[in-house]
Amino acid sequence: MADKEKRIVIAGAGSIGCYAGGCLALAGRQVALLARPRIEAALRQGGLRVSDLEGRDRLVKPEQLAVTTDPAVALPGADVILVTVKSGATQEMAALVKAHARPDAVVVSLQNGVGNADRLRAILGQRTVLAGMVPFNVVQSADGELPLNVHRASHGKVMIEEGGLAGLPDVAGFLNVEGLAVETHGDMKAVLWGKLLMNLNNALVALSGLPLATELADRRWRLVLAGQIDEALLAMKASAIEPARIAGLRPALLPKVLRLPDWLFKLLARRMLAIDPEARSSMWDDLQRGRPTEIDDLQGAVLRLAEKAGTPAPTIQRISALVRAAEAERLGSPGLVPEKLQAPPAGPRSA
């Protein structure tokens, strides 16, 4: 079977999944999207518009898309399964893959957080599961807009573990297509913990309601992010975890760069600020839609590590509590100011 005849299933076709699936379909790969009813209806009606920061703007017509809400339809023929659901749905998706997919299908986790590949392996047993990391943001068009547009709003290469299956030993090479750069990395644990450092900013975007570029350009917000990263690096060091470089910087330098004056930060951190001006975080989108966020797999992962290592993490604890409160209220982003996110000096304090 030729590579292009191998079948890819996007297991959880939201923003990242639709973007990856769209790029792969445009490159001639055989792709099926397992999606929510809202996404399925939009794709069947108007197709999928795939755009990016480099100026590509391409359309996958409805008749070119295989999309379904039924895992029993999507999964049985898969050679490669890209898991793109939110972290909280990982175990549910793993059970569906176990029930419906072939035992020799390769499963790739393209999810936030550091533990999803292990969760998949715990349920899928001897099946091949590869950890992966998506470095970029994808913005999805508003409900009702047709065609559904997924726009890659920042740069970066997808990283996955080396691995494959008979007839497809190089999964990364198979997935590496125009608009979706994919390569292997020898230490995915370091990559995932490095990505987590920057993902700590997702909550700040969610709580502020600001676009990512606007929020990062404001030193007051960067000070809060730097405080979180300091706490995370302390817990990682105590746990003998060495995170990979982020945006070309050694992780230890990241808080220092974030604390620079705005004018100097803009000069030195151009790569970090190369973001579509309207891009926000997936956590902001979750709050807007009244869905559970990934706070337990981002800030929560650091809090668990810090507790085990015996290191303090008051800023992260405060931000986690504020996101959980916003989840419970189901009113979208609370639009907080940076000063509201600082950890209380002592004792409990209301949000």
Image (cartoon, rainbow, N blue to C red):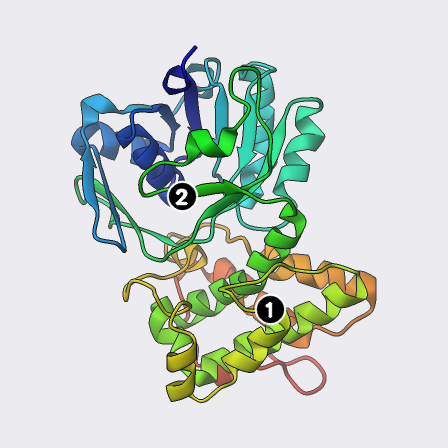
Q: Which residue is mark 1?
A: 250
Binning the other alpha carbons within 10 Å of mark 1 as few (below 14), some (14 to 19) or many (20 upward) gives few
Q: Is residue 298 above or below residue 317?
A: above
Name the foreground residue: 91 vs 246.
246
Q: Position of residue 177 (x, y in %)?
A: 35, 36
| Amino acid on which the number 2 mark rests in the picture | Ala
- Mark identifier at residue 102: none
Q: Nearer the viewer, residue 340 or 277?
A: 277
Q: In the rendered image, which residue does mark 2 sit on?
A: 181
- First in sequence: mark 2 vs mark 1: 2
Q: Residue 176: tell me if it is visible.
A: yes
Residue 113: image location, x then y, percent:
59, 51
Q: Which quadrant would the N terminus be assigned to in this image?
A: top left
Q: Is residue 68 in sight in this rendering?
A: no
The residue under the point 68% across, 62% down is: 302
As helix, strand or loop, the secondary structure at mark 2 comes to loop
How packed mark 2 is, by other alpha carbons closer than 10 Å (few <14, some 14-19, many 20 or more), is some
Q: Is residue 346 above or below residue 69?
A: below
Res. 93 image quadrant: top right
**Relative horizontal placement of residue 284, taking residue 65 as reference (left or right):** right
Image quarter of residue 253: bottom right
- Hey, which residue is sitting farthest top in the picture? 1
Q: Where is residue 344? Give x, y as percent.
A: 64, 84
Element marked by disc 1:
loop
In this orientation, which residue lies closer to the viewer: 189 or 74? 189
Q: Amino acid at mark 1?
A: Arg
Mark 2 and mark 1: Cα distance apart in space: 23 Å
Q: Is residue 127 above or below residue 90?
A: above
Q: In the rendered image, which quarter contains the C terminus?
A: bottom right
